[in-house]
Image: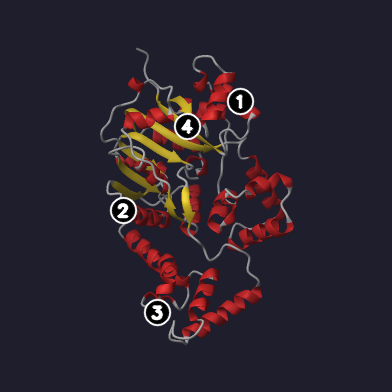
Amino acid sequence: MRSVSPGRRSSTSTSYSRAPAEQARVGSLITALDREDLGQQPGDLTKIAIVAAYRPLAATPLAARLRGAALPFLADLLREQLSEPDQEAELRDRLPVLKPPTDVVSRAVQQQYEQNPYPRWTRCSLGEPLPFRRAVQNALPDLPAGDIPDLARPRVLIAGCGTGLETMRVATTYRGASILAVDLSAASLGYAMRKAREYRLTDVEHLQADILDLAALEERFDLIDSFGVLHHMEDPAQGLRDLAGLLSSSGLLFVGLYSEIGRRAVIEARAHIARAGYRDDADGIRALRRSLMLDGAPPALEAVMSPASDFWTLSDCRDLLFHVNEHRFTLPQIGEMFGVAGLEFLGVQFGHTADRTRYLAQNPRSGALRDLRALHRHELDHPEIFGDTYRLWARAKRSPQ
């Protein structure tokens, strides 16, 4: 899951259902184009665009010739489907690898994101970076300033950077941040590196690694950011302990974890998928989407088809509804995990200021923002308040003075 809003997702050529007759006609179109001087015959540009709507151009016999073709009217399409994937492949060839993952679930998750990097995005809304202490205070306004280190150059680990949206958020939130962005998937990292270069992020290193192996870095971080990652591990509690061990003495941890309450529609959708036997491959995802879009979704599933949902493109839908491994939590359960990991809960970010105000009005006592059971009761009454993913802050427990 991501925490920076993308301005636009890139298109994919494999999003919607395709009848066999359509597939056959696309194949015939590719064969015909392969015999021509591309772009010289009437309608060629339209035919190429039609092919690209069904199949990635890089995976067709037309790719080599299209790379060298002068087709200005298709420049954006050729950039997205040919030159950008070429850049990502080049960057992946230079990607440092800590070690190949050995955990079975880690390898399954890696394979999913090699096939379907998430999300494929083109641009995002960016903020102006602030000094570290001030940026953290914006997220946790009740935390005393003296409890936040005043750092001109914070060292930040992004544990699960995906395709780079979280990297963009961190780089444009914390002034002077020196970032190590880590992920399991080389395909995702190639995308992230291309976008970092596009946005001229110069103080970001990328590394392919499993969170379970990060202790080998022998480095400590002022901030560890792991949004939407731990809940896909076989043992999220172990992942949390591993990250806690990488914090500096005054370091802060920001994690995003799925809410059992806020993700009810997804739970219903996954149960529907299991009952109907939809496979977790492209054809299975297309079949589900076709059924829900054309035949109508049961009321319990309507929320997963909202305009803001990840339902509408193939890779995003796989992440949302067909993920190979998913855990969900309540806030008390997360509190227990924090305690075992030696972490002190510092607060949860509300989606809107009005939600925070309403909670405090109903819970006016001191310390209410760190009371996980009170926050849990409030979420039961207002299931939408944290969305489907909690945004949580913690630090290493401090010894009594």
The residue pinned by badge 1 equals: 378
Say few, some or many: other residues with alpha carbon within 10 Å of mark 2 (under 14 / 14 to 19 / 20 or more): few
Kind of residue at disc 4: Leu
Q: CA distance from mark 3 to mark 2?
A: 32 Å
> At x 52% / y 83%, what residue is drawn?
31
Kind of residue at disc 3: Arg
Q: Nearer the viewer, mark 1 or mark 4?
A: 1
| Residues under numbered marks 4 and 3 in contact, where contact means CB atoms less than 8 Å apart | no
The residue pinned by badge 3 equals: 65
> Which of the numbered marks, if any, corresponds to residue 96?
2
Q: Nearer the viewer, mark 3 or mark 2?
A: 3
Say few, some or many: other residues with alpha carbon within 10 Å of mark 4 (under 14 / 14 to 19 / 20 or more): many
Say few, some or many: other residues with alpha carbon within 10 Å of mark 3 (under 14 / 14 to 19 / 20 or more): few
Kind of residue at disc 1: His
Q: Where 266 falls versus 378 (above or below)?
A: below
Residue 194 coordinates in the image, percent (x, y): 35, 57
> At x 56% / y 44%, what residue is drawn?
326
**Circle 1 sits in a helix, a strand or a loop, which is it?**
helix
Q: CA distance from mark 1 to mark 4?
A: 16 Å
- Of mark 4 and mark 3, the one earlier in the sequence is 3
**Circle 3 sits in a helix, a strand or a loop, which is it?**
helix
> At x 49% / y 17%, what residue is drawn?
367
Q: Where 33 falls versus 105 (above or below)?
A: below
Q: CA distance from mark 4 to mark 3?
A: 50 Å
